């Protein structure tokens, strides 16, 4: 055991051993740098510090569950920032939007890792010696041990000792070898046995495995990536950076490491429950993809659904959402098609009322923008206005407002495809000055006033929202975790025990003393001693 | 039976088992009241015997003299608890059968709580003899009764089918382990709480009469609490840090995403790891370890119930929110 008496689990200090424990250094009184360093190292690797660091780690993890995290949900994080302009700069300085990547969080777990290593290394050395060592000699006064028994028998002491050795061996105890022992009078009348050596091995395995898990986790966050993309059915996706809607690479991720696969989203199928309490919720949805692992390989059909991702070259493609993409065509004042295609509308509620934007920069005489909603099952009441009554496309319709002017696409600033830059736009109005609302059922057209053009809702597709991710090291982390659990079980449930038995002749009787020591704090030796004695001696002779 | 009938049966079974738990509690009270006066006098003697050894020796609590009537009430209480547990189990099974298609009854908070309380009672009944847990009976029945009431009054939800993301064999593995660990941690927490109560009473010169006299010695309580936690911790490790991440990898495409539920599962794990270390640290065993255990239990329950209320749609584990919202927003 290290000098400061640190132990990783609940192995109690040995009662028999009298290793001098140096008094804890009381403050740093005028120490040399080496001494100071040693003192600091001892403090850092002490159990108390490890405990404090553990609690600090738990405490430090809390803000990450309260404040929206950039890495977890950037949308919520930016929403929160917009709602709290005063707090945001403070929080940003503190790294509260990225708690698990922040320096102070890293400081805690790195200190913990140092403390862990500072504990494992000396402990492993101690364990290695202990593992090869003999069970300790029997204490002189077995009757003073907390758990002890005593009985008398007519058998000769040597017979008792021989029987004890075989009983203990059968119970998988390691027996002290008398031949290699010191003073004969100490060992000749006693048997010393020990078992449960693997407890400490499990303990060490657990702590080493924690480091393995951390290594696997670190690999994932360094070399992995997570990207999101929306693909309309019938469209294709190839795995290059430019095709992603959002992309979160690990710190050391190289974009050319992306696997060169591509796929076409051939179809998407969803079933909604029509009746009963859970009407409107989706029971099953899946997409069929035509996948090409490399640009030259033949496409193969693959179905993906929730809980069943597609795996290509270690990259995984998950189906995480879906929605509608109405086909909208805008003809300008001259009758030319200024915009046409499947337009992704983002779902806003359970009935798939969806929000989207159309930008027609090539329209003449002025650019045209549309902004509004899509309803898969259009319904209307005076109280609610238009709404979607069901998530399936039973009566699809769009309801959008039209804008004309400058879409702001030429000034070089990046623009979201789901928002209009309203600076240069004004609503298209009717003669009475009210804004024009484009309300279209599937297949219908509407003319914009003032010779601006027409809008047609000429088709409907669905889109799938896919998450593409690679987390190298996940297998290492999993293996580490399984090893950690194995070690944990060993360290919690293997009972390190020592048993001593001494047989001495007194008159024509032999007095047998048995004592035991359970070195784990959850243990209870009563049963063990009873069983050993039961195997040694008929019950009636025991006292 | 039809699905609707199963649902009604399940609800009535919950009410019935709550009544049975209450009757069991009354029987325990009756057993306590009918105990001969002498019992209270013997208890301190048993305690002082424990106190004299400086090493952890657990003297078995002296068997208090009991009358036949007391004995009858103790048996009645145990039988009632066992019967209540059976009805409780029936409520769980029919809850699963009430869904169309039939499923495991772990779809929402109501069902989780119903299962967790059952696990607590089942653990008590299983370990009753081995750990000599008879003294825990009133604490457990009262606790389960209170939690069931909250469950029915606050958390109740009608039966609906499982959301798509929950339809996975990992649901069974992950949730069974999580609920089992929650039950065992709860048992450990009860013992740790009793440790603190008894310790306080003893330090004030009390604790030698009444209920606390029947509770094992401080050393015994500390050891029993450790046993529950030593069982629960690996199970929790498996549930939260192995089965959970594997399932998350399949369902959400990442094995660890710092979702609030995951963060708090991790916090719970770290705190209980602290508990196991605390018991091995000089000056932390006993009192402080018990406090750490209760902090751990608080984080566990907060995670179990609180996350869904306070963080709502911010967590992918919020079962109240429909799949489309989480899928699209998440």
Image (cartoon, coloured by chain):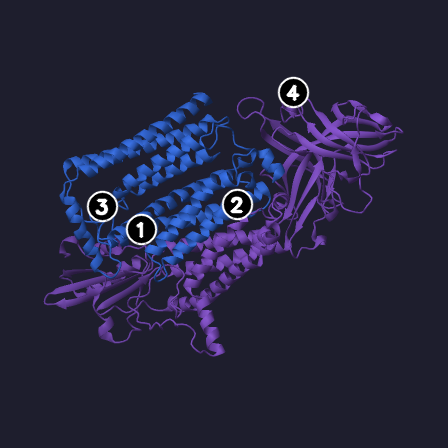
* Image coordinates for residue B233, horizontal then vertical, percent: 41, 50
| Helix, strand or loop under label 3 | helix
| Colour purple belongs to chain | A
Query: For mark 4, what is the residue?
Result: A382
* Image coordinates for residue B314, horizontal then vertical, percent: 56, 41
Q: Please say if A230 is above or below A157.
A: above
User: On what subunit does the disc labeled 4 rest?
Assistant: A
Q: CA distance from mark 1 to mark 4?
A: 63 Å
The outermost residue toward the right is A334
Q: CA distance from mark 1 to mark 2?
A: 31 Å
**Mark positioned earlier in the residue sequence (1 or 2):** 1
**Disc assigned to residue B196:** 1
| Helix, strand or loop under label 4 | loop
Query: For the residues carrying marks 1 and 3, which lies nearer the camera in this image?
Result: 1
Tell me what residue is drawn at x 58 percent, y 39 percent: A307
| Colour blue belongs to chain | B
**Can the viewer see residue A267 in this picture?**
no
User: On what subunit does the disc labeled 2 rest?
Assistant: B
User: On what subunit does the disc labeled 1 rest?
Assistant: B
């Amino acid at each position: 055991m290290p000098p400061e008496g640190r132990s990783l689990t609940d192995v109690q200090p040995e009662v028999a051993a009298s290793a001098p424990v140096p008094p804890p250094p009381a403050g740093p009184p005028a120490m040399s740098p080496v001494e100071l360093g040693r003192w600091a190292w001892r403090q850092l690797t002490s159990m108390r510090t490890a405990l404090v660091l553990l609690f600090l780690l738990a405490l430090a993890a809390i803000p990450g569950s309260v404040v929206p995290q950039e890495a977890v949900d950037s949308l919520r994080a930016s929403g929160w920032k917009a709602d709290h302009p005063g707090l945001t700069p403070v929080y940003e300085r503190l790294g509260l939007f990225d708690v698990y990547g922040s320096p102070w969080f890293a400081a805690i777990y790195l200190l913990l890792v140092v403390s862990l290593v500072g504990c494992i290394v000396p402990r492993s050395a101690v364990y290695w010696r202990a593992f090869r060592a003999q069970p300790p000699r029997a204490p002189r006064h077995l009757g003073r041990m907390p758990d002890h028994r005593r009985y008398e028998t007519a058998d000769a002491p040597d017979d008792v000792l021989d029987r004890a050795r075989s009983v203990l061996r059968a119970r998988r105890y390691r027996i002290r070898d008398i031949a290699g022992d010191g003073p004969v009078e100490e060992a000749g009348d006693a048997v010393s046995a020990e078992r449960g050596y693997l407890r400490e091995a499990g303990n060490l395995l657990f702590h080493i495995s924690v480091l393995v898990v951390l290594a696997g986790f670190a690999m994932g966050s360094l070399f992995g990536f997570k990207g999101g993309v929306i693909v309309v059915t019938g469209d294709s996706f190839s795995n290059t950076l430019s095709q992603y809607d959002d992309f979160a690479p690990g710190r050391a991720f190289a974009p050319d490491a992306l696997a060169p696969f591509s796929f076409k989203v051939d179809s998407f199928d969803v079933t909604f429950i029509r009746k009963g309490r859970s009407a409107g919720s989706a029971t099953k949805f899946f997409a069929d993809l035509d996948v090409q692992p490399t640009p030259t390989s033949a496409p193969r059909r693959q179905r993906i659904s929730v809980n069943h991702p597609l795996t290509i070259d270690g990259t995984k493609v998950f189906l995480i959402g879906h929605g509608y993409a109405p086909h909208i065509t805008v003809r300008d004042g001259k009758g030319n098609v200024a915009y046409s295609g499947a337009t992704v509308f983002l779902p806003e509620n359970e009935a798939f009322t969806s929000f989207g934007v159309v930008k027609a920069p090539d329209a003449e005489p002025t650019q045209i923008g549309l902004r509004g909603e899509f309803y898969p099952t259009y319904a209307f009441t005076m109280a609610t206005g238009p709404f979607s009554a069901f998530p399936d496309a039973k009566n699809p319709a769009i309801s959008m407002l039209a804008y004309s002017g400058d879409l702001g696409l030429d000034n070089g600033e990046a623009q979201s495809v789901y928002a209009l830059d309203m600076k240069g736009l004004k609503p298209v109005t009717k003669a009475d000055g009210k804004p024009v609302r484009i309300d279209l059922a599937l297949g219908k057209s509407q003319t914009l006033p003032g010779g601006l053009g027409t809008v047609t809702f000429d088709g409907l597709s669905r889109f799938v929202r896919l998450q593409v991710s690679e987390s190298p090291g996940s297998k290492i982390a999993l293996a580490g975790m399984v090893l950690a659990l194995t070690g944990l079980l060993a360290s919690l449930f293997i009972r390190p025990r020592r048993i001593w038995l001494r047989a001495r002749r007194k008159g024509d009787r032999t007095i047998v003393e048995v004592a035991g020591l359970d070195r784990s704090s959850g243990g209870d030796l009563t049963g063990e001693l009873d069983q050993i004695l039961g195997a040694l001696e008929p019950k009636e002779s025991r006292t | 039976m039809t699905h609707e009938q199963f649902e009604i049966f399940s609800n009535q079974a919950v009410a019935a088992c709550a009544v049975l738990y209450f009757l069991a509690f009354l029987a325990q009270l009756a057993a306590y009241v009918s105990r001969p006066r002498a019992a209270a006098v013997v208890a301190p003697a048993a305690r002082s015997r424990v106190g004299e050894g400086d090493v952890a020796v657990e003297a078995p609590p002296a068997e208090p003299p009991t009358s036949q009537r007391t004995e009858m009430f103790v048996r009645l209480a145990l039988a009632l608890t066992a019967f209540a547990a059976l009805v409780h189990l029936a409520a769980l099974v029919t809850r699963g059968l009430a869904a169309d298609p039939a499923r495991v009854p772990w779809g929402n908070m109501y069902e989780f709580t119903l299962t967790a309380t059952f696990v607590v009672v089942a653990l008590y009944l299983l370990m009753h003899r081995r750990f000599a847990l008879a003294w825990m009976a009133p604490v457990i029945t009262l606790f389960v009764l209170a939690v069931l009431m909250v469950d029915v009054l606050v958390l109740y939800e009608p039966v609906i089918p499982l959301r798509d993301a929950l339809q996975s064999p990992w649901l069974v593995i992950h949730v069974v382990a999580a609920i089992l660990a929650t039950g065992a941690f709860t048992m450990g927490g009860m013992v740790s709480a009793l440790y603190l109560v008894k310790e306080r009473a003893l330090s004030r010169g009390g604790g030698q009469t009444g209920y606390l006299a029947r509770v094992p010695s401080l050393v015994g309580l500390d050891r029993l609490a450790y046993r529950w936690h030593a069982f629960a911790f690996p199970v929790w490790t498996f549930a939260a840090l192995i089965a959970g991440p594997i399932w998350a990898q399949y369902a959400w495409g990442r094995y660890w995403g710092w979702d609030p539920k995951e963060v708090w599962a991790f916090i719970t794990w770290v705190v209980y790891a602290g508990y196991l270390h605390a018991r091995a640290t000089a000056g932390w065993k006993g009192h402080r370890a018990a406090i750490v255990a209760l902090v751990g239990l608080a984080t566990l329950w907060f995670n179990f119930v609180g996350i869904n209320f306070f963080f709502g749609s911010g967590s992918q584990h919020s079962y109240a929110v429909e799949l489309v919202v989480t899928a699209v927003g998440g």
